[in-house]
Image (cartoon, rainbow, N blue to C red):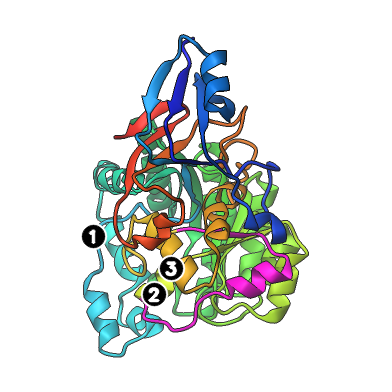
Amino acid sequence: MTARLFVNASQVVTCAGPARARRGEELRDANVLTRTAVAVEGERIALVAGDEEVRRRFPDAELVDCARGILLPGLVDSHTHAIFGRPRFEEQEMRSAGLDYMDIARRGGGIHASVRDLRERTEDDLVALALPRLERLARYGTTTVEVKSGYGLTVEDELKSLRAIQRLSALLPLRLVPTFLGAHEIPLEARGTPEGRADYVHLIVNEMIPRVVEGGLARFADVFCEPGVFTIDESRTVLAAARAAGLRLKLHADELRPSGGAELAAALGATSADHLAAISDAGIRALASSETVATLLPGTMLFLGKERHAPARALIDGGAAVALATDFNPGTSPTPNFPLILALAVSQLRMSVSEAVIAATVNGAAALDLAHETGQLAAGFSADIALFDVDDVREIPYWYGDRRCRATWVQGRPCVG
């Protein structure tokens, strides 16, 4: 097996350390090295050390000249909704006229608009639409992407969406992590009566989840726990059934109003609680005392025109593990640009560059139960590497909106560039 050496980088940002979510002081040091090379053998990183030592240990290796760019672990986008049909660009203008998220939903927009659209599409349509979108995500330095279902809300349409993700995994060099989100919204046909809501929760628990697990179509189950969507009790019912069936748990929690979603995620041992712009002090304490990763999505609040973002500083200072993700979706965060999310983390969430980078790599991996596999440049980890055309890691959130990713590798194989 011929090794490959990544040499001549101005910085190697390893994020090396424990193979778990980082907290507190651990977030402050992304381990930025100079005069350092990275050796890859097959799918794994073999050595990260001084340039001379690496060249001496691997004298016959293929050389990859980084041309004074910087090397990072490939970015881990742990929250996306990349399986959808048409974009919902008209809703942005509706928001500019003063309508909020729930107003648009009541008019038949929002998630329901995407549901109507997806139900009319074939599995082949969904694959064809998602393929270039995921390729765009990859071009910004992302190497691992969580992808949710959730715009079908029937048994067959949810399975169709998850099968599309499965097919995309075979077509793309990216690592895709599928999540079942049948509890994304109560479908319109079930909203008329309390019995309709109960029947839909029963459908998720007794038909959707067993079919998803039988087909091996998802690693996680997720619920949109929010006033007006799924209640705490409904969310608990769905997640308990998912856990009993062998799925790991995620939760859309406290996005628009505090409802106890973060506390529920912590109590159930969810891998992550996501959004959290309206998290309560009790929710912060619950996450800080749990293993649940707080995944923040600042692109969503920016696009919605909200002044309030998730309280990243309170979460970090309180001891919670914080990750970042794009929330790439057709209605509230249509961006594939993960470095832009890092810029928002620094400018809006008041995170340091080191905190933002670790939140987008190690802690993003932890939010997918993959911290043992990816998220850092260290011997034994998957060779998921991103090369950026900058001289200093602090430039990545500085050049906001600009695409500075020059190339990526996933499990040692070229992905972009």
Q: Residue at x 32, y 87 (%)?
A: 99
Which element is circle 3 on?
A: helix
Residue 213 quadrant: top right
Count residues near mark 3 (Cα–Cα under 10 Å), then give few for <14, some for 14-19, many for 20+: many
Residue at numbered disc 3: 344
Count residues near mark 1 (Cα–Cα under 10 Å), then give few for <14, some for 14-19, many for 20+: few
Q: Residue at x 59, y 29 (%)?
A: 49
Count residues near mark 2 (Cα–Cα under 10 Å), then give few for <14, some for 14-19, many for 20+: some
Indicate whether 110 appears above or below 26: below
Q: Earlier in the sequence, mark 2 or mark 1?
A: 1
Residue 285 colored in magenta in the image: no
Q: Which mark is residue 302?
A: 2
- Whether residue 273 is visible here, answered yes or no, is yes
Q: Which mark is residue 86?
A: 1
State the extent of the magenta-drawn residues as a range.
304-325
Labels 3, 2: front one: 3
Which element is circle 2 on?
A: helix
Residue 275 x/y as whole percent: 53, 68
How much space separates mark 3 and mark 1, taking CA atoms? 26 Å
Asked if the residue under mark 2 is in contact with the one under mark 3, i.e. CB atoms within 8 Å, the reply is yes
Labels 2, 1: front one: 2
Q: Which mark is residue 143?
A: none
Residue 170 quadrant: top left
Q: Earlier in the sequence, mark 3 or mark 2?
A: 2
123 and 93: which is toward the camera: 93
Labels 3, 1: front one: 3
